Image (cartoon, rainbow, N blue to C red):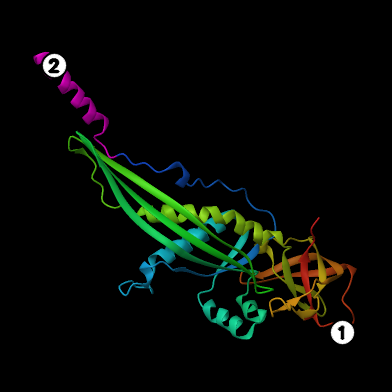
């Protein structure tokens, strides 16, 4: 009898030792691995993040302080960090773009978006957010699992046309489990970091598509002056270097699209090529000096009717 008691006591001690600490587990599909990006050597696009709002049911509650909106701020910070890590963008914050959106809706003009000072405009929102706690009880052990689910929606707008070129929603989930055996182990409170992990998991599914849609179109800039020398907008921080070659394109005709009722620009015509001689200015107002190596602007041409474009091979 004593021998049996001794064996049972040994089993109990083994169980206690194997689970005396809290076990935390995240589902494999929610783990986010950020690869170390190689330094980007190409031309950088300017992307303005207008807002990242909370559109969940909880945000519509009378007790929710929408002015502080912690979930929206989480989403904004995570998205900004992910895009900045690629090195392919110059990121701008534009908190007043709701007014610009309203202008666009009222006047149906892409000029409203061109006040942004960027190539692309990003609008994001948290569309779903929920958390739950489940548990299991055994004879000598019990466990508690905390789960957070989040849905994120993104819209990417081409500033030059005012068109939404990419729109998608993704969902992410994160969870952690704590367990006790014979009363020994963790009884963790709610893990606040699960919100970050769930939102991050959702955004991770969208980042690659955002990058691809921004870089699919050739990089573009504008002529600032063409008097004694040609000055174009953009410089070192955007990846422009001496001896780089770009083409000068005359804007296409503006026509009204009968399908959408919106004005649109037809494809432009290349009038020549320029070579960068030097760059200068501060990061907010950079410029480059260039000279034609092929073709040229027509005599007396209005420089606002032309733009600088990356040459794709």
Q: Is residue 10 magenta?
A: yes
Q: What's the mark number on residue 1?
A: none
Q: Which of the two labelled residues, at mark 2 and mark 1, occupies the earlier sequence position?
A: 2
Looking at the image, do the residues carrying marks 2 and 1 touch, with CB atoms under 8 Å apart?
no
Secondary structure character of the magenta stretch overall? helix
Residue 140 in the image, given as x and y percentages of width and height? 19, 33
Q: Nearer the viewer, residue 172 or 37?
A: 172
* Residue 301 seen in the figure: yes
Q: Is residue 30 above or below residue 66?
A: above
Q: Nearer the viewer, residue 194 or 42?
A: 194
**Foreground residue among 162 and 33:** 162
What is the crowding at mark 2: few (fewer than 14 residues within 10 Å), some, or many (at least 20)?
few
Pointer 1 residue: 300
Look at the image and say whether residue 287 sits in the magenta stretch. no
- At mark 1, the secondary structure is loop
Q: Secondary structure at mark 2?
A: helix
Task: Name the image quarter holding residue 164.
Answer: bottom right
Q: Residues within 10 Å of mark 1 (few under 14, many from 20)?
A: few
Q: Residue at left 53%, top 81%?
A: 99
Picture residue at 61% right of the left edge, 56% below the top: 209
Q: Is residue 15 above or below residue 144?
A: above
Horizontal relation, residue 291 to residue 43: left or right? right
Residue 229, image x, y percentages: 81, 75
Mark nearest the camera among 2 and 1 is 2
Residue at the extreme left: 1
* Quadrant of the image containing the C terminus: bottom right
Magenta part of the protein: which range? 1-22
Residue 71 in which image quadrant: bottom left
Q: Judge left or right: residue 251 versus residue 87.
A: right
Residue 4: mark in rendering: 2
Residue 111 position in % (x across, y down):
66, 81
Residue 202: x and y, percent? Answer: 49, 55
């Amino acid at each position: 009898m004593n021998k049996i008691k001794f064996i049972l006591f040994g089993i109990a001690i083994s169980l206690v030792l194997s689970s005396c600490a809290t076990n935390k587990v995240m589902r494999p599909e929610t783990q986010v691995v950020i690869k170390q990006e190689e330094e980007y050597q190409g031309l950088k696009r300017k992307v303005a993040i207008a807002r990242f709002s909370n559109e969940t049911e909880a945000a519509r509650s009378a007790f929710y302080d929408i002015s502080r909106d912690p979930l929206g701020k989480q989403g904004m910070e995570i998205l900004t960090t992910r895009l900045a890590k690629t090195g392919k963008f110059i990121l701008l914050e534009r908190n007043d773009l709701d007014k610009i959106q309203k202008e666009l809706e009222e006047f149906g003009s892409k000029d409203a978006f061109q006040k942004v000072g960027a190539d692309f405009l990003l609008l994001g929102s948290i569309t779903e957010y929920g958390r739950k706690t489940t548990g299991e009880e055994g004879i000598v052990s019990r466990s508690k699992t905390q789960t957070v689910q989040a849905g994120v929606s993104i819209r990417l707008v081409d500033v030059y046309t005012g068109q939404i070129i990419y729109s998608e929603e993704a969902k992410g989930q994160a969870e952690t489990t704590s367990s006790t055996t014979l009363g020994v182990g963790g009884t963790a409170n709610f893990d606040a970091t699960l919100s970050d992990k769930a939102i991050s998991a959702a955004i991770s599914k969208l980042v690659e598509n955002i990058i691809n849609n921004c870089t699919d179109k050739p990089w573009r800039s504008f002529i600032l002056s063409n008097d004694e020398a040609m000055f174009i907008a953009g410089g070192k921080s955007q990846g422009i270097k001496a001896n780089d070659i770009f083409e000068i394109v005359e804007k296409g005709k503006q026509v009204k699209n009968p399908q959408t009722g919106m004005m649109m620009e037809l494809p432009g015509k290349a009038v020549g090529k320029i070579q960068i001689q030097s760059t200068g200015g501060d990061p907010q107002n950079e410029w480059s000096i260039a000279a034609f190596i092929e073709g040229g602007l027509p005599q007396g041409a209005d420089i606002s009717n032309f733009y600088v474009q990356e040459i794709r091979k």
